[in-house]
Every structure is written in structure tokens, then in C-alpha cells.
Image (tube, rainbow, N blue to C red):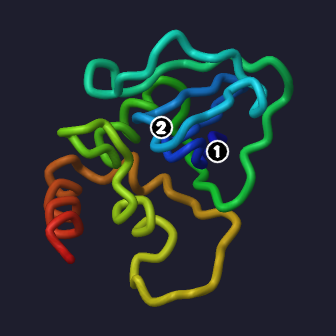
């Protein structure tokens, strides 16, 4: 079971002890403070995700998503589904949609089963994606 959360505005996916950073960070990040060796470089336009090396046990706190899909396959799916093409950043609107599809809830959830995101056909997700990103 994979867990997916956020790290400095990017997506952090943990799968079987492997960690993947998906997308560009949106704020400075002290990777060592979070338990990772600093990556050589992050440019999600050129490389949508990178594998991080942990220096100690890492806990992905709530809220987080859980997936049965794992590893690089999951990191690739997350990058295709949630990144903004032009800048390699995570779309906050799409991210929030995963936790509250109605957009009306003010309650926080700790964990959401999001396997459906990995299984939804790409052409269907594109319709959802385009609609969400067009909304104001």
C-alpha cells in the first residue's frame, strides 16, 4: 500500500520504503530536516518525478492518499494526473478535489483511498481535469 502526501508543495509518494518527489516544490525545502538527502536538482518540466533517498524513517502525515498502485508507476500516474504542464507544479484545485469532490466540506480527513485515480481512463480524467482547471 502506497501513501501520498505533500512536501514543500510537491507530492511525496512512499511505496515499499521508496520515496518519490512528484512535481516542483513551491517553497524552499530543507530536505535533510525532513529526513532526505538533498536531491541534485528538481525540474519537473524536464523530469516529472525523482526518487529521494531517505536518511531515516519517514512518516507521511495526514492528510494523505492511499493507493494500491506502487513505485515508479504510481509516481508517473500522479505526475500525469496532478501536475500543471506549463510549470511542473501540483494543481491545488486537483489535489483538493481528491479530498473533497463536492468542494463543500470544511472537515479534515486523515486518509483517502484514491486508487480510482490510478484506474480512471486517461481520456476521462482529461475531461475532469480540464473542467476543474477552467473553474474560477
Residue count near mark 2 (Cα–Cα under 10 Å), binned few <14, some 14–19, many ≥20: many
Q: Residue 37 location, x and y as percent?
A: 69, 16
Judging depth in this view, the residue of 117 and 61 nearest the camera is: 61
Instruction: Tell me which residue sits at (61%, 34%) in the image.
Output: 29
Number of labels in the image equals 2
For mark 1, what is the residue? 3
Instruction: Tell me which residue sits at (65%, 61%) in the image.
Output: 63
Q: Residue 66 location, x and y as percent?
A: 60, 51
Judging depth in this view, the residue of 26 and 110 nearest the camera is: 26
- Report how far apart the C-alphas of labels 2 and 1 lie in the structure: 18 Å
Which circle, 2 or 1, is nearer the viewer?
Answer: 2
Q: Residue 58 location, x and y as percent?
A: 79, 34
Reading the chain from its start, which is encountered first: label 2 or label 1? 1
Q: Residue 86 location, x and y as percent?
A: 18, 39
Instruction: Tell me which residue sits at (72%, 45%) in the image.
Output: 60
For mark 2, what is the residue? 25
Residue count near mark 1 (Cα–Cα under 10 Å), binned few <14, some 14–19, many ≥20: many
Amino acid at each position: 500500500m502506497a501513501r501520498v502526501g505533500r512536501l514543500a508543495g510537491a507530492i511525496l509518494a512512499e511505496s515499499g520504503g521508496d520515496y518519490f518527489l512528484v512535481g516542483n516544490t513551491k517553497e524552499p525545502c530543507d530536505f535533510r530536516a525532513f529526513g532526505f538527502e538533498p536531491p541534485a536538482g528538481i525540474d519537473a518540466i524536464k523530469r516529472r518525478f525523482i526518487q529521494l533517498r531517505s536518511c531515516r524513517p519517514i512518516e507521511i502525515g495526514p492528510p494523505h492518499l492511499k493507493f494500491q498502485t506502487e513505485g515508479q508507476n504510481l509516481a508517473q500516474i500522479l505526475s500525469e494526473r496532478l501536475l500543471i504542464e506549463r510549470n511542473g507544479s501540483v494543481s491545488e484545485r486537483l489535489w483538493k478535489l481528491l479530498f473533497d469532490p463536492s468542494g463543500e466540506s470544511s472537515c479534515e480527513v486523515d486518509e483517502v483511498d484514491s486508487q480510482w485515480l490510478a484506474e480512471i481512463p486517461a481520456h476521462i480524467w482529461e475531461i475532469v481535469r480540464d473542467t476543474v482547471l477552467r473553474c474560477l
